[in-house]
Amino acid sequence: MEPGQFLVCLILVITAGFHPAGAAQRGNSNGEVLPESLPSAPGTLPYFQMEPEDAYIIKSNPISLRCRAIPAMQIFFKCNGEWVHQNEHVSEESVDEGSGVTIREVYINVTRQQVEDFHGSEDYWCQCVAWSNLGTSKSRRAFVRIAYLRKNFEQEPQGKEVPIEGMIVLHCRPPEGVPTAEVEWFKNEEPIDSILDDNIDTRADHNLIIHKARLSDSGNYTCMASNIVAKRRSASATVVVFVNGAWSSWTEWSSCNVRCGRGWQKRSRTCTNPAPLNGGSFCDGMSMQKTTCTSLCPVDGNWEVWSEWSVCSPECEHQRGRECTAPSPRNGGKSCEGLSQESENCTEGLCIQGADTASDIALYSGLGAAIIAVAVLAVGVTLYRRSQSEYGVDVIDSSALTGGFQTFNFKTVRQGNSLLLNSSLQPDLTVSRTYSGPICFQDPMDKELMTESSIFNPLTDIKVKVQSSFMVSLGVTERPDFHGKTLSGTFPHGNNRCFGTLHGRNKTPYIQNLSSISSKPEMRVCGLFGHQGGRLVMPNTGVSLLIPHEAIAEDNSWEIYLSVNQGEPSLQLEGAEVLLGPEVTCGPNDVTLSTPVALTIPHCAEVSCEHWHIRLKRRSQQGKWEEVMSTDDETTSYYCLLDPFACHILIDSFGTYALVGEPLTDCAVKELKVAVFGCMSCNSLDYNLRVYCIDNTPCAFQEVLSDERHQGGQLLEEPKLLHFKGNTFSIQISVLDIPPFLWRIKPFTACQEVPFSRVWCSNQQPLHCAFSLERYTPATTQLSCKICVRQVKGHELILQVQTSILENERETIAFLAPEDDNYLAHPGPKAFKIPHSIRQRICATFDTPNSKGKDWQLLAQKLSISRNLSYFATKSSPSAVILDLWEARHPYDGNLDSLACALEEIGRTQSKLSLVTETHTEDPDFSYSRQNGL
């Protein structure tokens, strides 16, 4: 530039500095607002059509700042008070077609490094300076910042459990960031729009407020923070809206359980108003109430004495009457039968003319014929008794009157009512007693004394008298050796044992000293168990004990035992109670359990809450039996789950337990297992059939099998079930279809009857009736007949007997698996069908409340556990206890299909079916459990 040109430029600059417009521009640099538009006529200051905007540098990407001015000779950027080098500018020039004025546009790039290297008191900034003929103009400052968003939220939302219609407030403070992050709320991965739902507010400082909680508000809530750099999601906060349970109204009181006298009635209510949901508390109080009641007994009417005869009427008749008031019928009683008035001739027939005496002659002739017939019958009976005297008994055959059925009723001198449900009196063999009934036995001593050929032979000092009604009276004299309660020792067993030989007409058998009879051994198994738990099984009894994982403290181990009482029950029954299963003891008692163990006890009741009141009892250390719970009660101390053939009990301490039942109606049913055994007697032509009626529990049947095995007995037919009702009617047992020319049955044994009380109150003690058959010739080797067992006005069944009496041709019918000592105790993970890792995943999934109710309560429902859920609610892991109960109910089926189907129906777990059956088939524990059916 020449010196003259420089001088001109300097003058222009100085002039512009003192120009009013320049003053205006300087004011703009101090923060004053420039006019929106300036005239484009020549000689004006430049004004900016585009000014640089604030910008953010994302990661390492540079940003561009642009400005455009008109009219402008030059435009330069100034950043942080320093001019940007001309080489960093990119300039574009154009001409306005309307005015011909030059338009200049310039932009520069700002990098992340430039911003990071700046250390000023404020943020990095840049502005444009434009020159024209009249002076300069400055644009607004554009600030350049580095954009970022921290990872951690300053405050994340927290899960809550809120009652229905309560307020929910979830707090969220997003991470620090430039620019400031915006917050958005999500529920179950779906965005929440507070505009569409007036009950939800998200405007208050990023917080989520639900004014009144609804069940539909349960779910997983997430706070999302986002800016131009990134998005950040908070941890999920689970909100559970729960409903506390409330009782429904009481039902009406049931009718009194007895028709006459003092009884009880009950009413119930359910925790369904509303039902507890999503972990809500269960109702406090009892779900059932019982109270005593008194039913008025019906009183049948009875006649008063006849009144005096009235005065004789002209018709030669007089009348008399009586009233049904001694007493009058009340409470549904029967009215009096007969006439309330009667009349008769009061002149002894004098009023009747021409009386016909032919009817009187016929009357007297009939009476005379009847007297003669009675006399002839008496003479015939006397002659028949004399002809039978050689058998040592007096017999009158009245089978024509009884239909060939002989009834026998056992009863003692101190006999009570034989129809009472609780007939606890047992025969006392030390006193003289009279039996009237079938030759059927329940007491073990009687069973030993009167089996096989000796059953129908008179014993020493026994007088047998068969009366006209086939009632057998046995008078046993006192004998010091007969002490039924303290017997010891045992009879010799064998296939051909015989108790005595016949001596003359008295046929007196030799009877072994009863002091040699021994008591039955106790059934007992044991095993060593530790922290991993296991299973203890009593073979062939249906009794087992499941010890869950972590039930025993870590680093501890105990020798756990399980035993079944085979002797006389120690439980003293009250009222109409009956023992439904064996007395089971598990121990030792000083073991401390952190989680409940599952004890399985078989029972013989046909389960129905309408007909049975079933209770669990426990024997204290002092030997006293105490009621623990009723299966109808809801309690948090014990849990009873009744299956058709067994009861599964969750207990917190070891001890002795028993299951008792009280029939509520006549329709209460005990299931009896009927089995028939046979064996040869000491006489080669005789064959004995023994029919057992046993409570349908495996341990009771095993006891019979053991006794028969020792006596050489043979199981002739697969046992069948008899449904025995509590209607006070007896059982009749008869032998039918005996080949007439090959076999014959001993007298008085074709049909036998067992009183109701002896069957109903058998208390797990086997009862049997014996039948003695005789072959006509030794050449008969096959026996075919039918055994009919029926309850009067009840169930009836037929057992078909087809057997060979030759020892080498017999076929053994086996119904029990062989006892394997290795099968008794299963410590460790192999005792469980569900592998421990799978179990932990199921518990973690279902112990957590779910907005859709897919929690442990639904798991229990799908596994057919729907009663007394309050018990599980008190446990730290309800799902674990439910799975323990499922393990106890399914000890022998070799797969997990029922559990897998339950999970699939719930549909909560990911890959439900594969969770149990496919993904873990390589687990060695799982493979073992599938192979062994555990």
Image: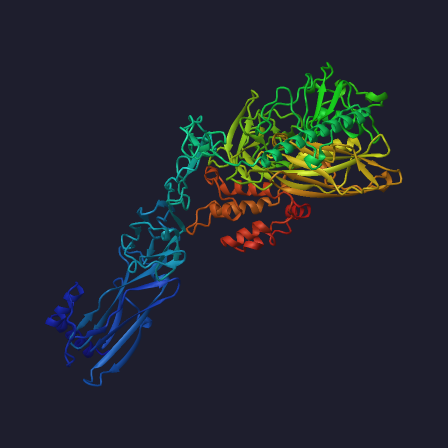
Residue drawn at point x = 51 percent, y = 54 percent: 905
- Colour scheme shown: rainbow
As drawn, the residue found furthest toward the front would be 354
Place residue 725 in its image quadrant: top right
As drawn, the residue found furthest toward the top would be 480
Nearest to the observer: residue 504 or residue 167: 504
Task: Mark yes or no: residue 622 visible.
Answer: yes
Residue drawn at point x = 50 percent, y = 54 percent: 907
Q: Quadrant of the C terminus?
A: top right
Q: Position of residue 398 (x, y in %)?
A: 71, 32
Residue drawn at point x = 12 percent, y = 68 percent: 23
Residue drawn at point x = 84 percent, y = 22 percent: 505
Q: Position of residue 658 (x, y in %)?
A: 58, 30
Asked if 210 appears above or below 42 in the picture, the reply is above
Name the side, left or right, on which 506 lies relative to 356: right
Asked if 782 appears above or below 23 in the picture, the reply is above
Nearest to the observer: residue 609 or residue 293: 293
Place residue 55 in its image quadrant: bottom left
Total numbered circles: 0
Q: Position of residue 665 (x, y in %)?
A: 52, 36
Nearest to the observer: residue 204 or residue 258: 258
Asked if 918 appears above or below 519 in the picture, the reply is below
Q: Quadrant of the N terminus?
A: bottom left
Nearest to the observer: residue 778 or residue 637: 778
Task: Mark yes or no: residue 701 visible.
Answer: no
